[in-house]
Image (spheres, helix red, strand yellow):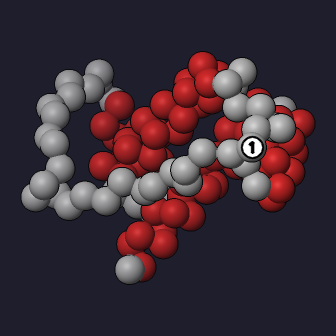
Amino acid sequence: MPPMKQAIYSSRTADKFVVRLPDGMRERIADVARNHHRSMNSEIIARLEQSMLQEGALDDDSNLRIDSPELSQHERELLQRFRQLSRRQQNALIALIAHDSELASADS
């Protein structure tokens, strides 16, 4: 399984999509984004990615086996330990990794 690549885009080349938010949601997103030290757009993207990763993990979970020849020994160990975590812990870890990769992208 090839490693996941972080999507690289700029505001000039990114697809744009208008979203109508219910009353008060814009302020809630702004508050959460501020607490995570990122823009509202980055917060929304991170949450969408996390949600889609979660959904993909649920759909593809049976397809990725620990004994798969595509996985290295380290990947097998990580996958095994990840699957031992509660769903809440898995979500927290995914969010942390997404946040760290976003910080690394901002630094470069």
Residue of label 1 = 69
Task: Please say whether residue 42 is visible from this viewpoint.
Answer: yes
| Residue 59: quadrant of the picture | top right
- Left or right of 65? Residue 26 is left
Residue sticking out furthest to the bottom: 108
Residue at position x 30%, y 49% in the image: 41
> Regarding mark 1 in the picture, which secondary structure is present there?
loop
- Looking at the picture, tell me which residue is in the foreground, 10 or 41: 10
Q: Is residue 23 above or below residue 31?
A: above
| Residue 39: quadrant of the picture | bottom left
- Looking at the picture, tell me which residue is in the foreground, 45 or 72: 72
Residue at position x 83%, y 38% in the image: 67
- Number of other residues with Cα within 10 Å of mark 1, as a class: few under 14, some 14 to 19, many 20 or more: few
Task: Please say whether residue 88 is visible from this viewpoint.
Answer: no
User: Whole-percent x and y of residue 33?
Assistant: 43, 52
Q: Is residue 106 above or below residue 43?
A: below
Give the amino acid type for the residue marked by disc 1 in the picture. Pro
* Numbered-mark total: 1
- Left or right of 45? Residue 83 is right
Residue at position x 42%, y 79% in the image: 107
User: Whole-percent x and y of residue 85?
Assistant: 85, 38
- Looking at the picture, tell me which residue is in the foreground, 62 or 107: 62
- Left or right of 35? Residue 41 is left
Name the quarter where the N terminus is drawn: top right
| Residue 66: quadrant of the picture | top right
Residue sticking out furthest to the front: 69
User: Whole-percent x and y of residue 73?
Assistant: 83, 56
Q: Is residue 14 above or below residue 12?
A: above
Residue at position x 76%, y 38% in the image: 68
Name the quarter where the C terminus is drawn: bottom left
